[in-house]
Amino acid sequence: MHSPESRTYRLVVVSNRLPVDSHVGADGAVVWTRSPGGLVTALESVTRGAECAWVGWPGSPDLELEPFDEDGMRLVPVSLTDDDVERYYEGFSNASVWPLYHDVIAVPSYHREWWERYVAVNRRFAEAAAAVAAEGATVWVQDYQLQLVPRMLRELRPDLAIGFFLHIPFPPYGLFSQLPWRQRIVEGLLGADVVGFQRVGDAANFATAVRRLTDTVVRAQHRGTQIEVADAPGRRRVVHARAFPISIDTASLEALARTPEVRARAREIRESLGPDRTLLLGVDRLDYTKGILHRLKAYQELLEDGSIEVDDAALIQIAVPSRERVAAYAQLRDEVELMAGRINGDFQTLKHRAVSYHYHAYPREEMAAMFLAADVLLVTALRDGMNLVAKEYVACRTDEDGVLVLSEFTGAADELRRAVLVNPHDIAGLKEAMLRAMRMPRQERRSRMRAMRRRVAEHDVARWSSEFLEALEQAADMSRADGDGASQLPGDARYSREAGRPDAREDRPDGSSEGASPGMSSTELLSDASEDAEPDRRLDLDTPPRWSRLPESLLAALREFARKPRVLVALDFDGTLAPEVDDPAKARALPEARAAVLRLAAMPRTRVALVSGRSVADLEAVAADFPDSVLLVGSHGAEIRLDEETTFEPLDEGEQYELATLGQILGDVADRHEAIWLERKPVGFALHTRLATAENGRLARLVALQEVGEAIDPDDVLVRDGRTTLEFAIRGTTKGEALEHLRQATGADAVMYAGDDVTDEDGFAALGPDDVGLKSGEGRTLANFRVKGPAEVSLAIARLADFREGDVHEQ
């Protein structure tokens, strides 16, 4: 064992490997060089020039080394024996945790002797870090091999600020629960002040595991989760769990890609493979999670069906050696090389190979040249925490050209939304994506690449590390100050995400039914009416020309409805009384609609209600000029205001947690997609896509559905999918239930309901034979009558007021 380190450091990084590799020089001396790994690159901006020590294994078994300095950083080696490597690293870390955390693409193995060695080695790392950390220092523990270190370190050094970052996915509880030592892993991670993940869904999965396996208090916040833990009797500490998507040193890669040497090398690569061929590139560590075989299969089928020719296209596959001592990886190498060889045997010509396969790593300069040379980068991972190769490709494309085909199962897909996103399990879809990328027009390529380059430039590795360390500093300060768990998560923000509209409100909770028509404008239809005009009560009861646009059958039904002793007229607001507008806060009922509502509300034995997906508070704002006698139903029935008294059953603890989890997931989705904004509701959230492009709106919906589905039990959340909104609610109330409640509360003999949206179909379904259902706009409906839009709804309720006024006076 090496002797204890006498120096201490303000920042200590702990990872399985030291950031260096060793080789023997010409003089027989050991020479250390910086490792090419993504973690080393990611942390370089933090460790460069800092008072920093890095604790890790030097990479060779049974190597006893004293701490040493390299490239301005103190390296503290942790020695591992051959048996340690076999059981802790190749065993528990890579044959148990790795496949389990990657959706069980390969079957995990669980052995007690592996676990016992994992515990022992984690303790060794914790002790080494404790020995070199200064009083109150920051210790940043990295990745799945060291998940027990935070708790061990907390027990050894409670004065430290401890952070942990998981670079790979954290699985859903249904998978994680099969791990025999699941509770020990969770408790180990809870030793940290901040636990960071690549994706919001990963953080939510962890929070679910904590709730299921421990007695701690879990509070979901907008940007993460707060977890109260007891370090000692009477001493509580708050652990913050949230997403911190890792990134790259964008500026460095851009500068490298602009050098004359790299540009010249890129031209050489293209010339050697055929300057007129479309070059597809795959760069992966040789691992079963990377989807290399899926990529080769799709490429093979494109050649087989004649969609592409070898003389027109080439696939370059870089397979970086990985875990060569593990049998499964050796088998994967055999399968990949056999398939690449078969494709070449079947399709190569005297002039060109179909697949250029390379089983080794390349220096950064060569990779930058390959990125510049490649027309298309294929990232087809079956599950990946982030995938920095995708970001590196984007950073190197200073020419704003090239197409990224990106698996939706990578963390990078959350950020690089202008990539061509694919499900790599869908070979037919993957083939289509590859062809689309190869044939994409220059203008579209440039537009997509520009957007992605802005993203990686703004969210680089320096921002990743600084945001994590700032959150860690704040969390540790809070715990040191009082430990009462009442503080808010660092970086918490309001729910409204649209730039320039922090308080933007919803105009329609779930979008409109397909092809909905806004109808004629009020100026076209109502030239004799103004918003402030007194309602005209001297209308001719013989049908004038303007009623002719209403079906005769509807007029007859309204006349019959008006004769009922006690009636309820329930109306949706947006798209029914009010035309759709871009700014929901500016939505107002058409003047004639307002006038008709005022007339109906003033009649005896006649109640009017607004039934909306908006909150009651929102309805009160947009319908402020309606009388107080108008009943209000908000959030699809979750809120009901009857005669100035609003009823709302408070959320229980589980519902509060799920609501906050929804907020943090959907808020992050809105952050990542341009012109998408989020509205909070009493029992859920509405993701608005009205102002986004069709593609951006579609992508935001897909991401939201996927990430919510990963984090929350589908049985616990109701999804309402409209044309321009996607709403998630943790309480399944409907407008149909609300109408039944209103019918009972008002004692109505008959109900009329008018609405335009798919959510209004629940209301129509609740109507009986004496009731009237009126659909505003197009789309399939259960309503027995339909009109064009809000202008015609206004005519209908005005005509109802005419009929009702005469019949009421006769009663």
Image (cartoon, rainbow, N blue to C red):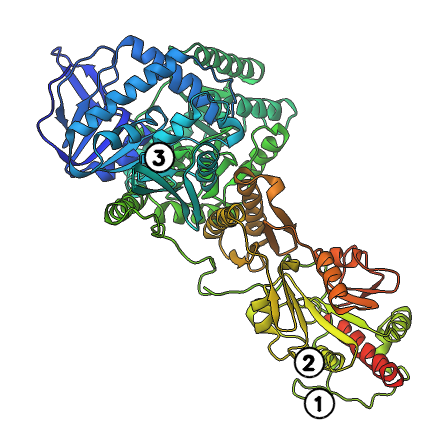
Which mark, residue 534?
1
User: Toward which corner of the image does residue 611 lie, by quadrant?
Assistant: bottom right
Nearest the viewer among 623 and 548 is 623
Q: Residue furthest front?
A: 233
Find residue 15 and report its horizontal and vertical position in percent: 28, 27
Find residue 771 and report its horizontal and vertical position in percent: 84, 65
Give the residue number, with chain letter if any, for mark 3.
190
| Residue at image location 45% in from the left, 15% down from the top | 110
- Which circle's residue, 3 or 1, is located before the other in the chain? 3
| Other residues around mark 3 within 10 Å, as few (<14) / some (14–19) / many (≥20) | many
Relative to 689, does residue 552 appear above or below in the rendering? below
Going by the numbered disc 1, the residue's amino acid type is Glu
Relative to 489, does residue 144 appear above or below in the rendering? above
Q: Is residue 191 left or right of residue 493?
A: left
Going by the numbered disc 3, the residue's amino acid type is Leu
Relative to 748, does residue 674 appear above or below in the rendering? above
| Residue at image location 40% in from the left, 33% down from the top | 389
Do we see residue 286 in this rendering? no
